Image: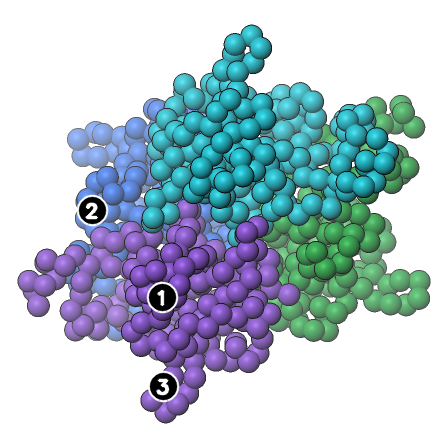
Chain colours: A blue, B green, C cyan, D purple
Amino acid sequence: MTEKTETVPGWLAPEELESIRGRMPILYIDAVPVRVDETGVVTHVGLLLRISSDGEVSRALVSGRVRHHERVRDALMRHLEKDLGPVALPNIPISPQPFTVAEYFPTPGVTPYHDPRQHAVSLAYIVPVSGDCRPRQDALDLVWFTPEEASSPMVQQEMAGGQGVLLKQALAHVGRLT
Amino acid sequence: MTEKTETVPGWLAPEELESIRGRMPILYIDAVPVRVDETGVVTHVGLLLRISSDGEVSRALVSGRVRHHERVRDALMRHLEKDLGPVALPNIPISPQPFTVAEYFPTPGVTPYHDPRQHAVSLAYIVPVSGDCRPRQDALDLVWFTPEEASSPMVQQEMAGGQGVLLKQALAHVGRLT
Amino acid sequence: MTEKTETVPGWLAPEELESIRGRMPILYIDAVPVRVDETGVVTHVGLLLRISSDGEVSRALVSGRVRHHERVRDALMRHLEKDLGPVALPNIPISPQPFTVAEYFPTPGVTPYHDPRQHAVSLAYIVPVSGDCRPRQDALDLVWFTPEEASSPMVQQEMAGGQGVLLKQALAHVGRLT
Amino acid sequence: MTEKTETVPGWLAPEELESIRGRMPILYIDAVPVRVDETGVVTHVGLLLRISSDGEVSRALVSGRVRHHERVRDALMRHLEKDLGPVALPNIPISPQPFTVAEYFPTPGVTPYHDPRQHAVSLAYIVPVSGDCRPRQDALDLVWFTPEEASSPMVQQEMAGGQGVLLKQALAHVGRLT
C-alpha cells in the first residue's frame, strides 16, 4: 500500500481516506453537464441515473474528490471522463471561479447540502459537453432534461444530498431557472 | 429612413445615434477572444490590429453596440462574426453574467475607460474561439498573444480607451495575469 | 426644458426619453435589498409594496435607469436612496460585476423578463442594507421576507415583469434558494 | 490528544495534520481586507506585515485553513478576527462564490501559487472592513495601501507564494487594477 501511495500521487488507500474523513473538510468538484445552442443558451442538463439494489431511482451530478497534486481543472476532466466516457468533449471552464461552493456537512441542516460520510466542500462548475456521452462505472445512463424538467419537483425529489438545490443554482446562474 | 428603422429592428440612422449620444449611456459589449487548451487554460488572447492613416498601430478587443430588441448574446455573436469572420466558431458564454462592466466615459479619469464620443457601458465577456479567424472590415489582422505578451507594456500601450486595463482584468479572471 | 437638459447632465425630458425608447436598449440597474447576519448569510429580502388604483397589490425590486455620465454605482446609490430613504445605509457592491443581467424585452417570451414600454437591459446587484428603510415616492412600504417566503408562489405571483425570477436568481447566488 | 480531537471538532493534532499533508489537498481561505468609500469603490488594501528573524520584511493576506465541520464563512470570520483583532468589523461576503480559487502547489510552476509545505486549495474573498484593525499573533502590523501601491513592484516583491498575483486578481475583480 505504501508503495502505491508513493507511485500514484494523490492516491489514497481506502483506510487512509477513512481516517482522514471526520478530521478535515475534503475537497470535491461538482460538474453540471449541459447542452447549449449556438448562442450559448443552455437547452438541456445531463443527470446520471442510478438504480439502487432495492430498485430506487436516483439522479446525480458528476461529482468527485480532488486528489493531492491535481489541479481542479484536471479533477473536472477526470471525473467527467469517468462518468460520461472518453468522447463527451467537455468544455472545461476557462476561469477557476466556481459558480458556487457547496458545503456538504455530515450533520443535516447546517447548509442545504448533506453527506453522511464526511464534510465535503465542493467547487461547482457548469460544463458544456458537445460530444457523445456514454456513462460508465456505476451509472446506468445519462439523461438529458430541459431546464424546466430539471427544476421540476419530480426530478428534484430524485436527487440526494442537496444536489437538486445545486442544480437549481446552476440553472439560475445561466438564466434558465423560471 | 423611417421605413428602414421599422423593418430592421435596432437599426438607427447615423443622425439618430448622434442625437442620442450625449443624452444616454449606450449599451455595448466587449469580447476578449481566447484560445484554450483541452483543460480550459487560456493559452492565447486575440487582438485586432488596426493601422491608422498616419501609420499608427493600434490593437483592440472585439467591441460594439447592442441593438434595440437584440439579446446580449446575439450582439456578441454578431460582433464576433463581423470582426473574426464566419468560421471563428466562438463559444458564447452560457451565463449572462459578464466578468466585468467597463464604463467608458467621455470625460477621462472618471473610470479607467474613456470614449471621447460617448458614455458607453460595456458588458465584457471572454470568448473561446476554436475555428479559423479571418478579420474583416477595418481590421488588418487578428494577432494571437500569450497572456504574458498581452499584459506586457508593449502591447498595453498599443491599446486605447482603457482596453489594455480591460484585457488585464480578463487575464486576471482566468488566472493568467502574473 | 432644453435648459434643464443642459444644466442637469443625464436628465432627459420625458418626450426625449419617449423618442429614444423603441430605438435603443435602455440601461437599468436592479437592486435586491437584503438583511444579513454577522457571518454574511442573507436572512431577509426587502420588497417594495405598491397598490394600484384598482387595489391590486404588487411587489417590486429597487429599479431604475442609469443616467448619462453617471457611474453604475452612483445610479445604485441614487435609486436605493430614492426608494429606501436617506438612512438605509446600503453597502454598494465593491465589484462592478452584476450577479446577472436581466434583459427586459417589450415582446414577452424572448427572455424571462418583460417591459411593455421598452427594451431595458438591467445590471442586477444584491445590496445589504443595515440602516432604517423608509420607502418614499410611490411605494407604500418595504416588507422584509425570509428567503423561503420570497421564493414562495404567493410572493412570486405578486411580482411583475419577471422580477420574481430575478429575485430567485439572487437567492440562488447567495446560496439561499432551496 | 485523542480527547481533544473529539471535544474540539475540526481540531487536528499537529502530527495528524503533518501526516495528512502530502496526501490530500488542504482547504484554505484567503481574505483580502479592503477599505471602501460610500459608493463601494475600494480605496485601500490591507496587508499584514511580518519581519523574519533575519530581518526580512514580508507582506501577506489573511489566510488559513478551514476546519472540519466549519462553514467557509465561519473560517473567514475566525481568521479575520485572529489576524485583524476583534473590532475590525468585517463584511463577510453574502455569496459563497469566491472571486477566484488559488491552488498552492508544493511544486513551483504548476500554478502561480506555491506552498512548499503542502497542496493547499484556497477560496479567495475580498472583505471590506470598517472597524479598527489591531493585528495580533505573529503579524507586526497591518498596513493600508492604495490600489496603485498594492500592485507596484515594491509591494509585489514583498509578497510570497504567489499572493502578489492573488492581490492583483482581487484588484482586477473590483476594477482597481490599472
Work out which quarter of the rendered image holds the N terminus of chain B and state it: top right
Displayed quadrant of residue B14: top right
Residue at horizontal 36 percent and vertical 31 percent from the top: C146
The amino acid beneath tag 1 is Leu
Left or right: C34 in relation to C118: left
**Which residue is identified by label 1?**
D84
The x, y position of residue B69, in whole percent, is 72, 30
Displayed quadrant of residue D17: bottom left
The amino acid beneath tag 2 is Pro
The x, y position of residue B72, in whole percent, is 66, 39
Q: Is residue A69 visible?
A: no
Residue at horizontal 49 percent and vertical 47 percent from the top: C91
Q: Nearer the viewer, mark 3 or mark 1?
A: 1
**Which residue is identified by label 2?**
A106
Instruction: Give the secondary structure at mark 1.
Output: helix
Instruction: Give the secondary structure at mark 2.
Output: loop
Left or right: C30 in relation to A119: right
Q: Is residue C3 above or below residue D21?
A: above
Q: Tell me the CA gap for discs 1 and 2.
A: 31 Å
Q: Is residue A144 above or below residue D73?
A: above
Instruction: Give the secondary structure at mark 3.
Output: loop
Residue at horizontal 65 percent and vertical 69 percent from the top: B151
| Residue B81, disc | none
Q: Tell me the CA gap for discs 3 and 2.
A: 40 Å
Q: Residues within 10 Å of mark 3 (few under 14, many from 20)?
A: few
Left or right: D147 in relation to A3: right
Work out which quarter of the rendered image holds the C terminus of chain B and state it: bottom right
**Which residue is identified by label 3?**
D52
Q: Tell me the CA gap for discs 3 and 1.
A: 19 Å
